[in-house]
Image (cartoon, rainbow, N blue to C red):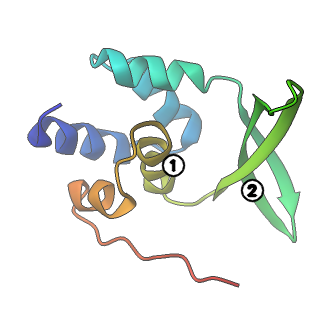
Amino acid sequence: MEQKDFEALITSLCQLENLPEALNALKASEDEEIAKAAESLAGQFSLAEVEGEKRIYHVFTETNDDGEDQEFVEHVMNEGDDVLVFISWFFYAMFEVKHKDTYAAAGRTYQQPKRS
């Protein structure tokens, strides 16, 4: 995908309200790789209230070295966060596009999360 096409895609995705809308738009992408990657994530998100925040997690299973399935949970964003947080996570997780590059495509500056 050319840079201008990537920027157009990111800009259009940023107009959406939330993770489900963005994921559906990614599934409908004309770019076959993006559509397949988005489709592979269907049904893998869960909402949980933790410390008074509604957090959205990516829940997935991988097989360990012993051949046993292990469930993993990764915090993606909080409910109500800017959809760009999810978009950036998606392109990093699926295509190793750096967060700062996705934010730059949206015309924004990426702020590294503070460590606790």
Q: Quick one: label 2, few (<14), some, or many (20+) residues within 10 Å?
A: some
Q: Quadrant of the N terminus?
A: top left
Residue found at x 40% / y 46%:
96
Q: Nearer the viewer, residue 111 or 51?
A: 111
Up the image or down, 54 lies above or below 2; here it is below
Q: Secondary structure at mark 1?
A: helix
What is the CA distance from the residue labelled 2 to the residue labelled 1?
Answer: 12 Å
2 or 1: tag closer to the N-terminus: 2
Residue found at x 58% / y 83%:
114
Occupied quadrant, residue 2: top left
- Contact between marks 2 and 1 (CB within 8 A): the answer is no
The residue that label 2 is drawn on is 55
Residue 32 coordinates in the image, percent (x, y) = 33, 14
Residue found at x 27% / y 58%:
101
Q: Secondary structure at mark 2?
A: strand
What's the residue type where badge 2 is placed? Arg
Up the image or down, 103 lies above or below 15; here it is below
What's the residue type where badge 1 is placed? Phe
Up the image or down, 25 lies above or below 87; here it is above
Up the image or down, 68 lies above or below 54; here it is above
Residue 107 coordinates in the image, percent (x, y) = 21, 62
Q: Does residue 35 appear to the left or right of 86 in the view shown?
A: left
Q: Nearer the viewer, residue 82 or 77?
A: 77
Q: Does residue 96 appear to the left or right of 102 in the view shown?
A: right
| Total numbered labels | 2
Residue 25 coordinates in the image, percent (x, y) = 42, 26
Q: Quadrant of the C terminus?
A: bottom right
Residue found at x 89% / y 27%:
68
The residue that label 1 is drawn on is 86
Residue 36 coordinates in the image, percent (x, y) = 45, 17
Q: Quick one: label 1, few (<14), some, or many (20+) residues within 10 Å?
A: many
